[in-house]
Amino acid sequence: MRGDFHLTLRAAAIFMKNLKWWQKTAVYQIYPKSFMDTTGSGTGDIVGITQKLDYLQKLGIGAIWLTPIYPSPQVDNGYDIADYTAIDPAYGTMADFENLISEADKRGIKIVMDLVYNHSSEKNSWFIESKSSRTNPKADWYIWRDAKADGSAPTNWRGIFGGSAWNWCEERQQYYLHTFAVQQPDLNWENPEVRQALYDAANFWLDKGVGGFRIDAITYIKKPAEFVDGEPDNKDGTVAIHKMTANTPGILYFLHEFKKKVFDGHDIFTVGEANGVAAEELNQWVGDDGVFDMLFEFSHLTLAFTDGEIWCYPRKWKLTEFKKALSDSQIATKENGWCPIFFENHDQPRCMNHFMPEGADSIKAVKAFARILMTLRGTPFIFQGQELGFTNVAWDSIEQYNDISSRGQYELSLKEGFTSKEAMDFVHFFSRDSARTPMQWTSGENAGFTSGKSWLPIHDDYKTCNAEVEDKDADSVLNFYRKFNAFRKDSEVLMHGDYEELLQDDENIFAFVRSLGNKKIYTLVNFTPDKVSFDAGFLNKAKKIFGNYSTTEKGILQSTEAVVYEEEF
Ligand code: GLC
């Protein structure tokens, strides 16, 4: 029997060597506008990122995903791109970017770019040309349709940021489609010239030495052959565009071509943002037969929201739903593919507010999430500020919010008859600005983020929640992330062990075990503010290795307690 264990371990060790660099490391997501400002402009810049590379190296990450830094009117904070192969002067120059790549490289860190290829900005020269007439060389680069006989939009589809997904263009006397904001026209992927232009842009960044791509909103690129009205899901007769265009058959043809012309043959990773791909379809998207290395799949994050025009309205969710969503993707990628593990990004509330009960101790709660993040199978993605324990902001008036979707959802909530207090409560819960407040580096002025006026207010907890203070506190969230990240990297069990969910029907506790050879690592997290008990028989001889309480009793979990046990047999 022991011999078997040794064999399994040896096989695992060989496999470990075969893991790719991006499977072994954690990835850190930077929202450049809010990371570090070195010019006093009030918005972050590339030089600021370079300055903080030592901080990131100490955190132990191996790649940085930058949200878009291309020239952009910033209607959607850079997700509206005006030029795919340049740097927005607000962030610096191409030389700054090249310097970032080389400085990061010296520290073993790769730079990953965000490709926003479903749509461009309306200010992109491609769109300016396309809208100028029905006969120009780029006339077919976007999705143009005639009005219905009564002059109304071609279909009843509703854009993701609210309102019709069509906008009228005087010059062409036609409508164009925009899945997101009016200023973000959808590109026409059916046109091979458009696809080639997008592949060329991605190859331009590969030539600069980037380590991978995060591919935005990718499930929307293929539109149905026929554009027809959908069954309305809203009083105004509209239907969410997501239901009509997401993951349309034929999309994989485009993606395989994309892979062949751009990704193949490079030592990079790709992660697609793929709302609408179910766990059972994952194997067509990732792994040996798929197109990407990983997919951001959102079923564990969307549970807290309703599905409708006002999607920000909080929904009561059950812990068993959350656990199932995570377990499903763990199981789906077990044989084939790899998971990006994430609970926060620039579009999500902070995990403490998103998932933890009101009144929970926020430090304990964020550490509990860090444990889940680092012990599931996959590559952990840490969103800036998460490693410091950032929580949501709750500003008084909608005027203080910058996020285009917060403003849209607020207006819709009022139209629906909610009071302004209720509408603000929704905004406080979901606003993307909570993820976008500036990094808190010090307890000094503007949290050390800028010497000017910050583009978005700084969270008022910055005096205690910041990198400088947490660096010195051995028990801080930051030091916990550093420690646990290092632990994960060295743990064969966490890198490659099997995943099994435990206490599956329990509505209070998320418990799972990772096993490899003669070792097991258990993670247990209490998602309630109360003390809860469970049958701890399975913990047998396991020893606690990490916890967010100094003492732990097997079979009992205190309020938001999280414990990691290890067992060797
Ligand atoms: C993605 C981005 C989001 C952006 C949207 C439109 O979902 O993450 O920030 O608003 O695409 O590009």
Image (spheres, helix red, strand yellow):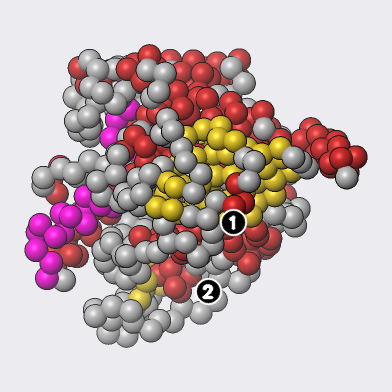
Residue occupying the point 63% across, 67% down: 280
Residue 436 highlighted magenta (yes or no): yes
Location of residue 190 by image quarter:
bottom right
Element at label 1: strand
Tell me residue 433's x, y (percent): 27, 43
Residue occupying the point 35% across, 60% down: 304
Q: Residue 108, which numbered label?
A: none
Instruction: Please name which of the two marks, 1 or 2, marks the residue nearer to the observer.
Output: 1
Magenta region, mostly helix, strand or loop? helix
Residue 251 highlighted magenta (yes or no): no
Contact flag, marks 1 and 2 (Cβ < 8 Å): no
Distance of mark 1 from mark 2, alpha carbons?
A: 38 Å
Tell me residue 127's x, y (percent): 41, 53
Vertical arrangement, residue 445 with respect to residue 364, above or below: above
Vertical arrangement, residue 407 with respect to residue 39, above or below: below
Magenta segment, which residues? 417-441
Q: Which residue is mark 1?
A: 501
Vertical arrangement, residue 17 with respect to residue 541, above or below: above
The amino acid sitting under disc 1 is Glu
Q: Looking at the picture, tell me which residue is in the foreground, 135 or 500.
A: 500
Quadrant housing the N terminus:
top right
The amino acid sitting under disc 2 is Pro
Q: Residue 224, which numbered label?
A: 2
> Mark 1, residues whose alpha carbon is within 10 Å: few (<14), some, or many (≥20)?
some
